[in-house]
Image: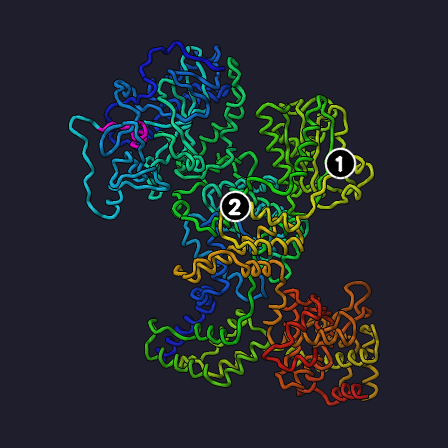
Amino acid sequence: MAAAASVASQAQALLRGRICDQGFVHSALRSSPDTNYSKLKYLVGSSVSEACNNSVLLLGPRGCGKAAVVEMVLDDLKKEHPDAISVIRLNGMLHSDDNCAMKEIARQLCLEHQLSFSKMASSDDNTEFMIDMLRECGLAHKTIIFVLEEFDLFAQGKQRLLYSLLDAMQSLTSQAIVIGVSCRLDADQLLEKRVRSRFSHRKLIFLPSSVDSLQRLMEHLLMLPKDSHLPTKYVMEYNARVTSIFSDKKFKGILNSLTDSDATTSHILRFLFRVVSYMDMDSGLLSMQSFMNALSSMQRQPKMDSLQDLSILELYILVCMHRLEDKEHSSYNFTTIMKEYKSVQDAYRTSDNYSHNICFRAFEHLLDRELISFADKKGKALEYRPVKLLISSQELAQSLKLNTICPAVLQKLLDRERYM
Amino acid sequence: MDLSTPSKATSRRKPKMVASPSPMSPATPSTVRRSLRLLETPTKVPSETPVKPTSTPKRKRAAPSPKTPIQPEPKRQRRQPKKRAYYLKVVYDGGEFAAGDDVYVKRREGAESDADESEEEMCRVCFRAGVAVMVECDVCLGGFHLRCVRPPLRRVPEGDWACPYCTAERAGKAIERPKPPEGKRIMRTAKEKLLSSDLWAARIESLWREPDGIFWAKVRWYIIPEETAAGRQPHNLRRELYRTNDLGVIEMETILRHCYVMSPNEFKDANDDGDDVFYCEYEYDINWHNFKRLADIDDEPETKEDPSDEPYNAGNEYNSDTDEDSEYDEEEEPTKCSSAGKNQAHELAANLWKGRIYGLQKIGIRKIPEHVRCHQKTELEKAKATLLLATLPKSLPCRDNEMEEISAFVKDAICNDQCLGRCLYIHGVPGTGKTMSVLAVMRRLRSELESGNLRPYCFIEINGLKLASPENIYKAIYEQLSGHRVGWKKALHFLTEHFSGGTKVGKQANKPIILLIDELDLLLTRNQSVLYNILDWPTRPNSNLVVIGIANTMDLPEKLLPRISSRMGIQRLCFGPYNYQQLQEIITSRLKGIAAFEEQAIEFASRKVAAMSGDARRALEICRRAAEFADYRIKQSGHTSVNRGKNVVCMGDIEAAIQEVFQAPHIQVMKNCPKFGKIILVAMVHELYKSGLGEVTIDKLAATVISWCHANRELLPGYDTLLKICCKLGESKIILCEEGTKHKLQKLQLNYPSDDVSFALKESPDLPWLSKYL
């Protein structure tokens, strides 16, 4: 029994390792000719070997594997041309300021070529250093590849960084490639006109993959290899089980409902990680149940969940706010809510009549959970500051229905006014 | 300045004779020279004074001079009081040597005794020199008479030629080369000796006469591939040399005669320039043992520091330009130290201004990559290379009038005896060749200056976008004028003084200054003082300043304060966008002689670009991209492409390139959205038509989406799922949305026209019911 469990945990570790390894996930791309991977590799590889400058934009929604493809291409090219490629990585989140980006470029260049670096250098110095380095590296047949992640954030302000980079690339001896990675589809429209004119406008679009290719990806990731250290019998059994699950109709349904909301690779990987975590540790096999559990854990509705475990008083407050909104009170605050609450209590005489202080604490609790929020940030005491409801009426109605401890009065209050 | 040397009348060397008789083989020929130098260099003279640091490195490097190892100490004392005369050209032993010439240098002293070897090469078959035309084998470098080769050749073949022996050896056959007849030694030419490292080659950097009458030369050594750390690499040509960064001081005595070391382009054209032609493409760093391509325009820091351009006036006292040369000295030292692995602290940071020359030598590559040298370029690759923006075209078509005007303006400004300040404003959309034309004019003027038709002037080029702040322009101008760095306020002070006729800055005090400011609009500050100052200087008397400003907007002067626009707006030049004929001409002139493009393809591209922007860069990039597409297509289809005719860029490639450049990718992305994403987009269009308002809250949107899903038997999405999808769409800017923390109150708006959405989603296979809501 213990042996089986250890085999299962080994298999689990192997599968988790694979799912987290971007190289393995995307290794299927290497063989086929018409992928973004091979296009980018051709583009970068030919500019390295033919000593020309290029700039390319990789666009596509988050999670489609843009950065992973760039990494793979760079790894491959580093193997093909050892010693001839240096990579400078910048991220728009960190280096959107031109001066700081220049400093970072200088720092990475120094690091790459074992030169000493000074933090004190001015931004002019760093710019000149970069241009010098571009020339010298070009003369030595070395290519500098700039990878700019969150490219759209570099296209703010005067765009001095992009301009000086692209302008330096117009000189004959330099040998550089700028790879911009962005999830904004209009990233190239953000460039200023003289920067855009210098940009060479190669664009690669990354799209979410189709359901078929996602299923292939799942097979690629979940099938255990025959030549691993795991016992052969177990591997056979496991693979047979996975194949039978994949051919199941139910699995199709799961996959469809998963891809209906988000079909990107990273979404699928997150799903698979959960599937593997729900593996039955006794037998070491995946079952349909583990897929179902993973799916339901992927499709949590956090607002509904937090509505479920509210206290009665908090539900009262929400319902009162909702009533106020329905009565077309454009702005209301805690005191207005309390008035409404009092009137409800007066009308129905429930046992849930709490004091002002307790109500205020419940109100603050709701604020903390971000189910309601203040309409404007500052000013006035908390009681008088206008608030707003952040959940829709349908959500509220649904959660009242699901809530078992909810008094019938509340439902009535909500329903009454809906149909009145 | 031609000076013959009567003192050395003993013509031990006939002009066309080579010295050393038999190759006295040194034990390890490749290491001798270097080790000699390494032995000598570190010997520091203890009494070295900081007063004249220049002399020390030179003397240190003088060590390898094989003739008379000079003792540095006495020499210096002798030299100091007297004068050293520098010459541009020296006639020595019947040969005329000038700075910049390449020469053979003798390696050992005793090597000149007998002079019985002719420079002429013997045929490898008949072993006679003769006058008949000989052809050189590109593999073994042996010479062959045309008639001696089997089968005999009629004329010198085009391209590479290998002799029958070499071809046989390559094929793996053993073949016996003809032996020389008895009693006749094979005589080696200077070239052969050089290539077997019995001679050295060097380039003369400067020539001078010591006060004792001995002529000296400072030379830059060449090195043969075998002597480098990487050894001879398979792609090295037989006649290839590397230039080193190693300077030596030798006596003129040791110089043998001229040889010709050529750049690749010159070498290509030098088919029958004799035997002493060598090929040099790379520079070799002797400290770091790495290679670097020689720049086309030789502006290495070393050459700048050479005193060679100033003290050429014969008889001038050698006033050592101390700080420059000492810098060079220091530069040598720390690199050596750090190569020994110590003394890292002394090294200045490379990205500092002061440390800029330190360490950049390190960057060279260990071995020249093979693909660079051996790769035969296909037509498409050649086309790609010429279409690069970086490639400087030989001629600039279609901008003759503008260039004429610029050059007239500049000449007019300088040629007047009293240079009046002027200002020219050039405007035009990006990619119309503004900067390029001005630079071309300046290049032309420089060549005119060199031929002496023009007054000397000083040209300063500044790009507004490369300055950290507008005020830094003062700093940049001052630095280019004087070579010193100061803060911008101080620089402004100095410059104002300079231009208003006070104390002048820099060496070329009275030369007219031509100031080119690119991207002029970037110099706008709030009170426009920078622009005012710069444009005010030319109007001062005796300012000698000419300003050429370049910017995109046509009405920049009108946008400025009146006092500035009155100073700037007088003379203007407009670069209009190119029309399609001009673009076509530009592209075809670049592609001359390369059959890689279909005629219509070029026309299509240029028409398309002319209709859009008239940007030449864009047109070139589109053509290059199309060539890349074609190349990719050919490489993917495998090397066994049947129809060779397809290997050109056709309309399809151009169209693909244009699509990539001009078409926004949003439609493609919309088509590939997840299902709920599509429903949301369509619901937004629906709401837009219903309410007429651009904005919609997610509350409403979610209600619509859920009711649709309900009606069409789709799975019902949760509210939070919808919110997440909206945020994702907002991230890629298909829709504009507020942050997700607003939950119900989040407002959404389509970022693209609703027609695009309906076009993209009208026929989506997975949601056939969607079209009825459009």
Residue A328, percent from left and from top: 83, 78
Quarter of the figure that contains the N terminus of chain A: bottom left
* Mark 2 vs 1: CB contact within 8 A: no
Relative to A219, say whether A407 is above or below: below
Other-residue count near label 1 (Cα within 10 Å), few / some / many at <14 / 14–19 / ≥20: few
Displayed quadrant of residue B722: bottom right
Relative to A373, say whether A47 is above or below: above
What kind of residue is marked 2? Answer: Lys
Residue B154, percent from left and from top: 31, 38
Q: Which mark is residue B571?
A: 1
Residue A302, percent from left and from top: 63, 76
SS label for mark 2: loop
Residue under numbered circle 2: B592
Specify which label sits upstream in the sequence, 2 or 1: 1
Residue at 78% across, 78% down: A321
Relative to B637, say whether B241 is above or below: above
Horizontally, residue A113 falls left or right of residue A298, namely left
What kind of residue is marked 1? Answer: Gln
Horizontally, residue A412 falls left or right of residue B353, namely right
Tell me which segment is drawn in magenta.
B186-196
Chain letter, disc 1 residue:
B
Is residue B191 rendered magenta in the image?
yes
SS label for mark 1: strand
